[in-house]
Image (cartoon, grey):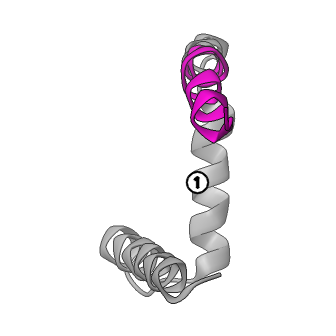
Amino acid sequence: MDSRELFDLALVVLAGLLAYTETFGFADPRATLEEILAVLVTLDVRVYLVLGGLFGIAFVAYLVVYLPKKDARSMRP
């Protein structure tokens, strides 16, 4: 990894920690993890189907649009 990737990774980790402490405070992490899992378990199956469909659409778009462009740029005549 170059220094820019490490810096970006550090920023993502810092933002995640700040978002976690802003949302849950400095409470017991095990209790808040159980609360998060309880919320995820109680969601309707349609929510998971919609999220899976959106992920599938994004993945197919990545395969069909981005990868051919990347392959065309990397080919040398």
Span of residues in magenta = 56-77
Q: Nearer the viewer, residue 72 or 44?
A: 72
Residue at (36% x, 70% y) in the render: 19
Taking the spot 67% from the left edge, 60% from the top edge, the residue there is: 34
Q: Position of residue 42 (x, y in %)?
A: 63, 31
**Residue name at image x 52 percent, y 77 percent:** 5
In the current view of this chain or complex, which residue is farthest to the front? Answer: 77
**Spot occupied by residue 20 in the image (x, y as percentages of width and height):** 43, 72
Q: Which residue is mark 1?
A: 36
Name the magenta segment's main secondary structure.
Answer: helix
Q: Amino acid at mark 1?
A: Ile
Residue 68 or residue 77, whichever sits in front: 77
Q: Residue 17 occupies which quadrant of the picture?
A: bottom left
The stretch drawn in magenta includes residue 3: no
- The answer to which of 51 and 75 lies nearer the viewer is 75
Q: Is residue 52 above or below residue 17?
A: above
56 vs 25, left or right, is: right
Asked whether, in this view, residue 73 is left or right of residue 45, the answer is left
Q: Secondary structure at mark 1?
A: helix
Q: Position of residue 60 (x, y in %)?
A: 65, 15
